[in-house]
Image (cartoon, rainbow, N blue to C red):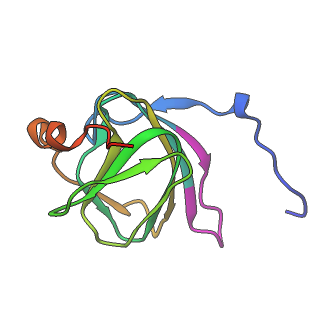
Amino acid sequence: MDDVTIRPAAGRTTKPAPAASFTGTVLQDSLATPEAPSRTSATLVTFTPGARTNWHHHKTRQVLVATHGTGMVQVKGKPPRWLRAGDVAVVPPGIVHWHGAIAGQLFAHISFVETDGPDNTTWLEPVEEAEYRSVAVAPEG
């Protein structure tokens, strides 16, 4: 390729995220798929209020760029971290975590993952509702 490729937004298909790996309504819009030598995929993920991923981990790092609303990311055994538009979260390989919207707010992020094959993400159990509700309220300020 010797020129820039532009993929118009109207040409992309937004699809629902797989219910087996997410709680609530989550939409995914693929922005980039790996093309050798690149190993990076990029997906715009939109979470309706209260929606979130299951616990999971990746073989490679994941970078989350918050684009809209307020959300959170939580590493297993640690308190949640807030994400607001413009914030960037870098999740190292192998770290068990989840991310999604807080209760009452829409949240979107772009997920960048350096893939090493089709089994890059290991999906685990859903975040328990009581656990989610105990942490998913908007922070002060």
> Between 6 and 91, which is closer to the camera in this rendering?
91
Lateral position of residue 50 relative to residue 30, left or right? left
Write the residue at 62% across / 46% down: 31
Please report the residue visible at 34 percent of the width from the left and 36 percent of the height from the top: 18
- Confirm whether the magenta stretch covers residue 120: no
Q: Which residues are magenta?
A: 29-41
Q: Would residue 98 be found to the left or right of residue 132 on screen?
A: right
Residue extending furthest toward the left:
130
Q: Quadrant of the C terminus?
A: top left
The N terminus, quarter of image: bottom right
- Residue furthest front in the image: 141
In the displayed structure, 101 sits above or below 76; it is above
Q: Position of residue 104 (x, y in %)?
A: 33, 26
Q: Position of residue 122 (x, y in %)?
A: 28, 59
Q: Is residue 58 above or below residue 82?
A: below
**Is 56 displayed left or right of 13 in the figure?**
left
| Vertical arrangement, residue 28 with respect to residue 115, above or below | above
Residue 22, image x and y in percent? Answer: 29, 38
